[in-house]
Amino acid sequence: MGYLKKILNNCNETSLLILKNKEEKLSFRQKLEMKFHIYFCKCCENFEKQSNQIDKSLKAYFESINDRPAVKVSDDFKQRVKEKLNQ
Amino acid sequence: MQSHTLNFTRWVDDYADYLYSYAYYKIGKKEEAEDLVQDTFLSAYKNRETYNGVASEKTWLMAILKNKIVDYYRKLKATNNFSFYLDQTQETFEDSFFQKDNYGRWVKKINENYFSNAADSYLLGKEFQSILGSCLEKMPPKLRSVFVSKFLDEKKSEDICKEHNITPSNYWITIFRSKTLLRNCLEKRGAIS
């Protein structure tokens, strides 16, 4: 029963596997344990759902850097670089 | 070729923010990102003869910056304390999110929340994007620079590990912690609004 209890309760490990599974092939055993856990765990099911939503949003966020940078340099900095270029 | 016509002053005005934005997320430190941007312009100026006008100015500058970032991480190799950092912060992270004495259950339940089933128009809209931006700002820079690489460059995890000189297992720990922290921040911010 110890094994089953562990699989059912290990959100820490499962949520890491959920992320890994998006990019890499998990072992058969890892995949089975992950699916089994998610089947009984609403929290990890929601974690996966929300993680996918966050990825979607992040993708757009970093694509938009192209048009409007998310963080900016100061005018002082620009001035300094220009002066260096003119030396 | 036409190097004498390249206007470097205008380049600084047009591209500094863009280059800095990339470098800032990639490196995580403001001063070092600024240094890299400055070096990029200086290198571009020095090598202006090699610019053939085929690639856009922005693309050309970006290629130079990316090389500088590779060098940056290569130099960091000798003093890379990333593993040490992860080890040191492990307990604090796990204690905040997982119940150690209960096989690692979430401390706080993850319920459906305001963005669980949100439509794309909301996720990509101004409000959510700005909350996302401020939550990214709050993340530990060390974690963030690895975490955002996938989105900045659409790189595979293998290449990101190589670039940042970290092991695959540390990569996944980083992705996992970052995602957990980010999710938590978004949830909190949503509860307020």
Image (cartoon, coloured by chain):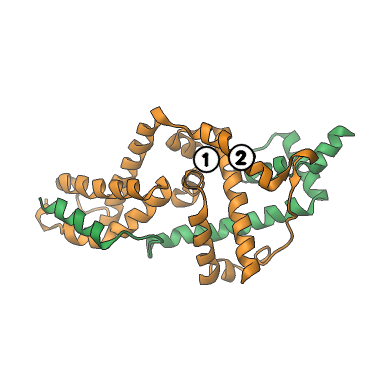
Chain colours: A green, B orange
Amino acid residing under circle 2 = Glu
Report the side of B170 relative to B46 (left or right).
right
In this view of the protein, can residue B10 be seen by the observer? yes
Amino acid under disc 1: Ser
- Seen in the picture, residue B164 relative to A22 is either above or below; the reply is above
Q: Chain of mark 1?
A: B
Outermost residue, top side:
B78
Q: CA distance from mark 2 to mark 1?
A: 9 Å
Is label 1 in a helix, a strand or a loop? helix
Q: Tell me: B102 left or right of B128.
A: right
Q: Nearer the viewer, residue B130 or B57?
A: B130
Label 2 sits on residue: A24
The quadrant holding residue B102 is top right
Which residue is pictured at 75% across the width and 34% down the height?
A29
- Write the residue at 86% across / 37% down: A4
The residue depicted at 57 percent of the width and 44 percent of the height is: B175
Taking the image as drawn, is residue A18 in sight? no
Q: Indicate the secondary structure of the residue bearing disc 2.
A: loop
Locate residue B133, reporting x and y percent: 49, 61
Please report the residue visible at 49 percent of the width from the left and 36 percent of the height from the top.
B161
Question: How far across and how far down the image is residue B143, in percent?
Answer: 51, 44
- Looking at the picture, how far across and down is residue B25, in whole percent? 42, 51
Residue B101 appears at what percent x and percent y? 78, 39
> Mark on residue B157?
1
- Badge 2 crowding class, 10 Å Cα cut-off, few under 14, some 14 to 19, many 20 or more, is few
Residue that extends furthest to the right in the rendered view of this protein = A1
The quarter of the rendered structure image containing the C terminus of chain B is bottom right
Can you tell which mark lies on residue B5? none
Callout 2 touching callout 1 (CB < 8 Å):
yes
In front of the other: B50 or B178: B178
The chain holding disc 2 is A
Eyeballing the image, is B115 above or below B8? below
